[in-house]
Amino acid sequence: MISAVLPTYNRAPLAFVSGEGSWLTAQDGQRYLDLGAGIAVNVLGHANSALTAALTEQAAKLWHVSNLYRIPEQERLAEALVSKTFADTVFFTNSGTEAAELAIKMARKYHYEMGAAHRTEIIAFDGAFHGRSTGAIAAAGSEKMVKGFGPLMPGFRQLPFGDHTALQAAITDQTCAVIIEPIQGEGGVRTLPDACLKGLRDLCDSTGTLLIFDEVQCGMGRTGKLFAHEWAGVSPDIMMVAKGIGGGFPLGAVLATEDAASGMIAGTHGSTYGGNPLACVVGAKVMEIVADDAFLAEVSRKAAQFRQGLEGLVASHPTVFEAVRGTGLMLGLKCKAANTDVVKAAYGQNLLTVPAADNVLRLLPALNIPQEDITEALARLDRAAVALKG
């Protein structure tokens, strides 16, 4: 008999009733150190007082009016994002998946309005994850994502990750855009080198192709910059954002240049809930905190400490761990043992981690995780590895 909740997840036998900072309390009263942060969502930890205050104040005034009217809270968050990024304009969604759908529409509409309606193909990369809508799974193209859900939306092509020769050959007069994660999350915490991002930007410029960055997981301060592409000194034409931007409240966005967004006039896209006052006051508070230079410097400092400790774990447990991946506090442990076994061993130490492809263990803590919690996390990972070796 099917459960009341559609069984599309293999859920761990854990249920949490409260959280504070980097800690969660389960129904049985046990406390768990959270290195998953809701899959890179809770960038300021659980029950953050500043976010709680902003949400509570807004909840007592106004929840929802729809985008038939101006929403001042939305406008303030859009202005904050525009002031801190490459973008000239922002559309708010409820999720990264919705952001992917708009990014696809925006890129194709741009070329249509430019008189090149034949330019519809979007190039993506092996290992990518852009959400679970029909458009997003067609972009990713992996068998795990698409099997049984055909016919797929046409107009997508997948290339090997990091294959520059294949990319140069793939861009034709049919190519609309290239979509890429500067750091693949679900794909195994694989970082695209800065030189590759620069080369990609140059290639798109020379061919009139739009460049879409998916920073749903790697954005919002996770790498020590507000957005990961900033390390390479390049900018996209369109960018998808979600997860951390709401600090735990459902919120996503598409950021774009005026040129890339020029085809998106009234009536071309919409959202009933996107950019509602509740989401946007939380997002504005997240931006106020995370976009601060001193905060981002702290992320980088903590990340260096964490990475050093993880390198030590690799050296101490070579039959369990193989290498450290990632940037900032978007880190991964490439495992020799099955990563799912490592996740379970960590549960035994009251530690929460997130598996990824390529046998990688993702470590995505709150960006404001205290130093003592990083030390404790390393100790618990060490004990998990010892337990796994038996």
Image: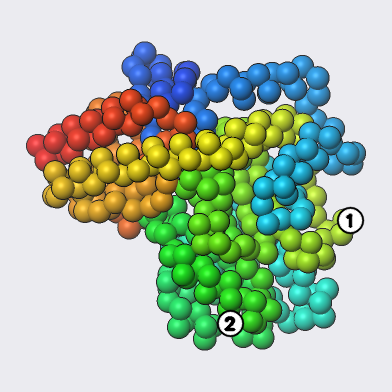
Q: Which mark is residue 266?
A: 1
Residue type at tag 1: Ala
Q: Secondary structure at mark 2?
A: loop
Q: Which is nearer the N-term, disc 1 or disc 2? A: 2
- Is 51 drawn above or below residue 298 in the view shown? above
Q: Does residue 372 appear in the picture of this structure?
A: yes
What residue sits 20% from the left and 42% below the top?
313
Q: Quadrant of the N terminus?
A: top left
- Locate residue 95 relative to residue 3 in the image: left or right: right
> How many numbered badges does the structure rendering display?
2
- Is 132 drawn above or below residue 313 in the view shown? below
Q: Position of residue 39 (x, y in %)?
A: 47, 40
Q: Position of residue 240 (x, y in %)?
A: 63, 54
- Is 271 drawn above or below residue 285 in the view shown? below
Q: Are marks 1 and 2 in contact (CB under 8 Å)?
A: no
Q: Which mark is residue 171?
A: 2
Q: Position of residue 307 (x, y in %)?
A: 31, 44
Q: Crowding near pointer 1: few (<14 within 10 Å), some, many (20+)?
A: few
**Alpha-carbon distance for marks 1 and 2?**
31 Å
Q: Quadrant of residue 354?
A: top left
Looking at the image, the residue that sits furthest to the top is 29
